[in-house]
Image (cartoon, coloured by chain):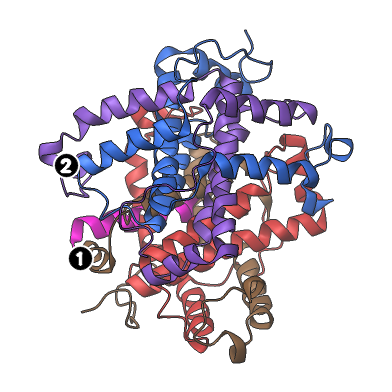
Chain colours: A red, B brown, C purple, D blue
Amino acid sequence: MKVGIKANVPQAQGGGSLTFLDAIEMVRRFCDQRDWRQFHKPKDLAIGVVTEGAELLDLFRFKNDEEVQALLRNKVTRGMVADEMADVQFFLLRMSEVTGIDLGGALQTKIRKNRSKYPVRRAKGSNIKYNQS
Amino acid sequence: MKVGIKANVPQAQGGGSLTFLDAIEMVRRFCDQRDWRQFHKPKDLAIGVVTEGAELLDLFRFKNDEEVQALLRNKVTRGMVADEMADVQFFLLRMSEVTGIDLGGALQTKIRKNRSKYPVRRAKGSNIKYNQS
Amino acid sequence: MKVGIKANVPQAQGGGSLTFLDAIEMVRRFCDQRDWRQFHKPKDLAIGVVTEGAELLDLFRFKNDEEVQALLRNKVTRGMVADEMADVQFFLLRMSEVTGIDLGGALQTKIRKNRSKYPVRRAKGSNIKYNQS
Amino acid sequence: MKVGIKANVPQAQGGGSLTFLDAIEMVRRFCDQRDWRQFHKPKDLAIGVVTEGAELLDLFRFKNDEEVQALLRNKVTRGMVADEMADVQFFLLRMSEVTGIDLGGALQTKIRKNRSKYPVRRAKGSNIKYNQS
């Protein structure tokens, strides 16, 4: 099975029915039990998003497509990828709660904007960013 | 109102009822209409997570707490923060779909792990990471 | 002593007389002895710059000004900062060698450009980026 | 000519004779003329390293080896890469000055450490990190 190229039916999306609000509440409870609000300023949470994102990317450093696919098939390294994705998600949700910015709504808005920015006719099959055309 | 310090009831979480599976499907449809699967390899999606996360962080660069709060109160700059958060979320969801990794489930698993890694008794009010203690 | 605010005479710049060309050559020899050129494609080296930069930033996560200064006074943690700065520098120099881009020259060119972009009269004491004014 | 794979004699290293101390002084003068020391706290400079590094990486996003090489041959896009590399270097040098950490010396120390961490015998031709072996 080719991972990462062919369309996937996300078979094991057991967490797929989780809503953004549930997820935010789960993160909030975990953090508040530890009294971490004092550290969780928006700027530091954005730092968290980037540093955890970099740990995710670090797993793929110096790896070619085949090596990335092997890494995603291996149970242990696949779990490491899942862990780092979760860490980014954690900080993003916490940032949503702390700032009051509606993350799910922001996503809906952004996709709407991107429909105009990348009209199907022009963007189809192109990796050119709008500002490079 | 102090933003980013006091607990927030996320008033305007209009997207809060969105599930991870709905969000993944929304992103998938947008990308597939543009035939972008060929570019969306896991490594490049991880690059997307980091570069968009850095654009989010860039909004706070050189800003102190008061300036960050002012930025989050201003409608225009608040919208910029929301936009960048959405961009990170976009790539995270796309990565979930492309790799078949259950993002919501990974979050639940990670919070469970973190409960042991950061027991309330030791972690309360501390910003020391487990590996620095 | 206040670290990070007052002007410093960089007392211990023992490596200060190192030239960019010497540094590039030092990195090249280290990498070529290990036969790493095959992995050191420009894109992966840019990933290296970002992931090592994120490890540097991670040392300051959730820390306020006083905590950052304490961290920079402590010999062990100061050494960790130096190590991460060196890692970023390593990848930047390797990228210069691999692409043939003159890093020292690029710095000189960029500062020249920035003199026009941020004229003293307008930029003095301001943290507003040119594109936000 | 293959860029980024074959060894390069860095032909145009006009800035190669620049020393780290000269470069630090050049950056210091530029910043002090603009009275930017107040913003240049170590944590924000580390943010600068990461966000500029991400802008560098962003130039390669979704690009395969051939596209990266074409981008490095094209005069305009090659200049963009050089500019972003310079931006990372700028913040790294400023951080060296502001913290008093000897950047050139840190590089020498780190390469010495890496000689033990990655002994030629084990590291030759391998992209396995020491902690993954």
Distance of label 1 from label 2 (alpha carbons): 21 Å
Q: Quadrant of the N terminus of chain A?
A: top right
> Which residue carries the number 1 mark?
B70
On whether disc 1 and disc 2 are found on a single subunit, the reply is no
Is residue C60 visible from the viewing direction of this image? no
Q: Quadrant of the C terminus of chain A?
A: top left
| Residue B21 drawn at (x, y percent) | 56, 62
Residue that lies at the very extreme toward the bottom in this rendered image: B121
C3, above or below A4, in the image: below
| Kind of residue sitting beneath label 2 | Ala
Q: Position of residue D11 (x, y in %)?
A: 54, 10
Which residue is drawn at the image coordinates 23% and 61% (left, top)? B71
Q: Chain of mark 2?
A: C
- Depth order, front residue of D64/B64: B64
Query: Residue at 64% across / 69% down in the picture?
Result: B105
Identity, as a three-letter code, of the amino acid under mark 1: Ala
Q: Position of residue D79 (x, y in %)?
A: 41, 20
Res. D107 image quadrant: top right
When asked about the image quadrant of residue B129, the answer is: bottom right
Bounds of the magenta span?
B73-90
Check residue B82 for magenta coloring. yes
**Can you tell which quarter of the image residue B57 is in?**
bottom left
Q: Secondary structure at mark 2?
A: helix
Q: Is residue A124 above or below residue C53?
A: above
Of residues D35 and B1, the one drawn nearer to the viewer in this rendering: D35
Is residue B67 at least partly visible in the picture? yes
Considering the whole magenta stretch, tell me its main secondary structure. Answer: helix
Q: Which residue is mark 2?
A: C123
- Above or below: residue A4 compared with residue A54: above
